[in-house]
Amino acid sequence: MTSPELQALSLKDIVTQDFHAAAVFEKYALDFCCRGGKTIDEACRERGIEAASVLGELNALRSKSMESSPSFDHWEIDFLIDFIVKNHHAFVTRMIPILLAHTQKIASVHGAHHPEVVRIAEHFSTIAGDLQQHMQKEERVLFPFINGLAQAKRTDQHVVQPPFGTVGNPIRMMEAEHQSAGDEMRIIRELSGAYNPPDDACTTYRVTYQELRDFEIDLHQHVHLENNILFPKAILLERELTSTN
């Protein structure tokens, strides 16, 4: 794909076509998930970045990555849900207690000289509580309903209207919660100087910043798969099935 073609696409569409592009956008702190509707030019202008640099890296990446890039957009909807739960939900569940312990430890030990780590611990505690509730709602309510839509499509079954009316209602709630988590992680990134520890940071301090960086990267990929691929597919599938009932 040429640079003009890339420039015409939104960030979320570029990542949907080639998931490896997420690494480039992460490098430049360009939001391809919650605010992924912008073009490269628009996103770079907001960040004060040269769009040509981003385009150059994308073109170099795409020439090497297209054959190995997962085609999430072509996966069956219930297979995608299974992937999200087993990979991204599992990662969040595993990392939350680790990061709660680590952020609280460095806040206790280093907070007097680096007050930003106290705020980082507070913001991560908010994220942890919110994401745990968020994933439960997805796994217990939203995802089973979407899986039911996929099964109804395969077996030509009638779709029973859920108590929440239409799948778009919980999806809007999940998207709002994604935005909130992303905003909290953006604050943490800013407080940490883009996860760069100070010269006097101990090993736990440095490890925690790397863990937070990895957590944010995973969150962006996680939200992209849901907001930009899974949720639009679910809305279209429900519309298709209810229009034929």
Image: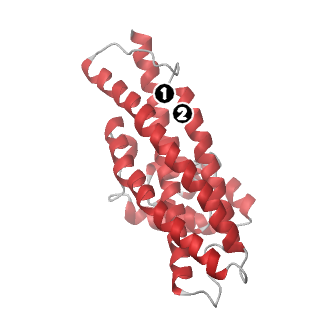
Q: Look at the numbered disc 2 and give the secondary structure of its residue.
A: helix
Q: Position of residue 128 (x, y in %)?
A: 55, 55
Q: Position of residue 140 (x, y in %)?
A: 41, 35
Check disc 2: other Cα within 10 Å, few if <14, some if 14-19, many if 20+. Answer: many
Q: Real-space Cα distance between discs 2 and 1? A: 9 Å
User: Residue at the location (63% across, 47% down)?
Assistant: 179
Tell me which corner region of the image, top left, top right, bottom left or bottom right, holds residue 182. Answer: bottom right
Please report contact status of discs 2 and 1: CB closer than 8 Å, yes or no.
yes
- In the displayed image of the protein, which residue is found farthest to the front? 108
Q: Is residue 30 visible?
A: no
Is 46 on the left-hand or right-hand side of 196? right
Q: Which residue is mark 2?
A: 171
User: Residue at the location (56% across, 64% down)?
Assistant: 26
How is the structure coloured here? secondary structure
Sequence order check: which comes first, mark 2 or mark 1?
2
User: Residue at the location (48% across, 35% down)?
Assistant: 231
Three-letter code, disc 1: Ile
Residue 235's disc is 1
Residue 197's disc is none
Q: Is residue 60 visible?
A: yes
Q: Look at the numbered disc 1 and give the secondary structure of its residue.
A: helix
Check disc 1: other Cα within 10 Å, few if <14, some if 14-19, many if 20+. Answer: some
Q: Position of residue 73 (x, y in %)?
A: 40, 42
Is 118 on the left-hand or right-hand side of 73? right
Between 64 and 90, the one nearer to me in the picture: 90
Q: Is residue 173 above or below residue 110?
A: above
The quadrant of the image that shows the C terminus is top left
Between 42 and 230, the one nearer to me in the picture: 230
Q: Position of residue 60 (x, y in %)?
A: 47, 68
Three-letter code, disc 2: Ile
Q: Is residue 21 above or below residue 84?
A: below
